[in-house]
Image: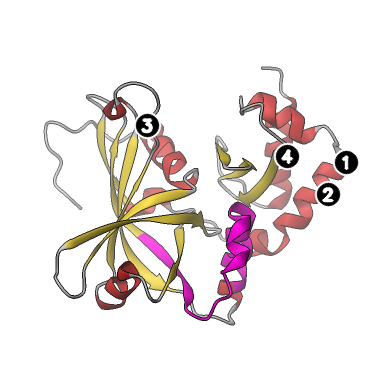
Amino acid sequence: MKEPSSTLRETDDEARKLARTLLRSARYAALAVLDAETGFPFASRVLLGTDIDGVPVILVSALSTHTKALATDARASLLTGEPGKGDPLAYPRLTTQCRAEQVERDTPLHARIRARFLGRHAKAALYIDFPDFRFFRLIPQWASLNGGFGRAYVLDGSDLVIHSLANDDIAEKADAAVQDLIVRHPDLLSKLTLRLKASEAGPWRICGVDSAGFDMISGDLLVRCEFDTPAEDLDHICSNISKIAYLIP
């Protein structure tokens, strides 16, 4: 953990929520590794997903420089956060320093991550099962949040991870529970689109659920909604989603 300095603000729940949203709402990120041959930093762009515990996940080819680098040195850094119009430095961004862990094929963990990744990146189905492609979980160690000018924070890696005993059960049953919720409430997605002020582009669908929130996607657009308090089980998740959809703005 880095020593705080006078330029840093005290990390509060608002900063933690912003950091989690920046990380979990990103469909891609800048990945920096240490080049295995030169030792120099090497940055590239990668597609980004999240596991059920909020840990960021990447799908990479064994032929790429960054994959070879991670095989030699597991340390990596992710930059997430998108600029808009005007000064790009006025927009929040998050640098997350991680340790990469390769996900073994033909395991329940691989199957879970594969399904969640395709929910967010449908076009990855074209190559996701190629023999040279593999997943890495990037375990957050600490993070630096810049929320805009004068808003700098340091976060512990645990601030970005979802700590819940229900993670495995949610991962196994979430898709079915969400589909059942939509069947019982046919206008749910349209209500959520309005509540979350999503773009008019559509149709929108829920592409990922965990105990801390859920993701909605439409084409290349993704919106992350964090719950006020983490859900304890699937019923609590469905209840939270319904409340968000049907509460009066």
N-terminal of the two: label 3 or label 4?
Answer: 3
Q: Nearer the viewer, mark 2 or mark 3?
A: 3
Q: Amino acid at mark 2?
A: Asp
- Per the model, the C-alpha gap separating discs 4 and 2 is 12 Å
Q: Which residue carries the number 1 mark?
A: 184
Tell me the SS state at disc 1: helix
In the displayed structure image, the side of residue 103 where residue 247 appears, left or right: right
Q: Quadrant of residue 236?
A: top right
In the displayed structure image, the side of residue 128 where residue 89 appears, left or right: left
Q: Which residue carries the number 4 mark?
A: 239
In the rendered view, would you say 85 is above or below 39?
Answer: above
Residue 50 point in image, percent of width and height? 51, 56
Residue 169 point in image, percent of width and height? 66, 63
Q: Which residue carries the number 2 mark?
A: 180
Q: Count neighbours of disc 4 (C-alpha within 10 A) and say few if under 14, some if 14 to 19, many if 20 or more.
A: some
Q: Which residue carries the number 3 mark?
A: 83
Q: Residue shown at 75%/49% (left/top)?
A: 178
Q: Residue shown at 17%/49% (left/top)?
A: 2
Residue 241 point in image, percent of width and height? 69, 38
Residue 18 inside the magenta-drawn segment: no
Q: Amino acid at mark 4?
A: Ser
Q: Amino acid at mark 1?
A: Arg
Residue 246 point in image, percent of width and height? 75, 26
Q: Nearer the viewer, mark 3 or mark 4?
A: 3
Boundaries of the magenta span: 111-139
- Per the model, the C-alpha gap separating discs 1 and 3 is 38 Å
Observer able to see residue 166: no
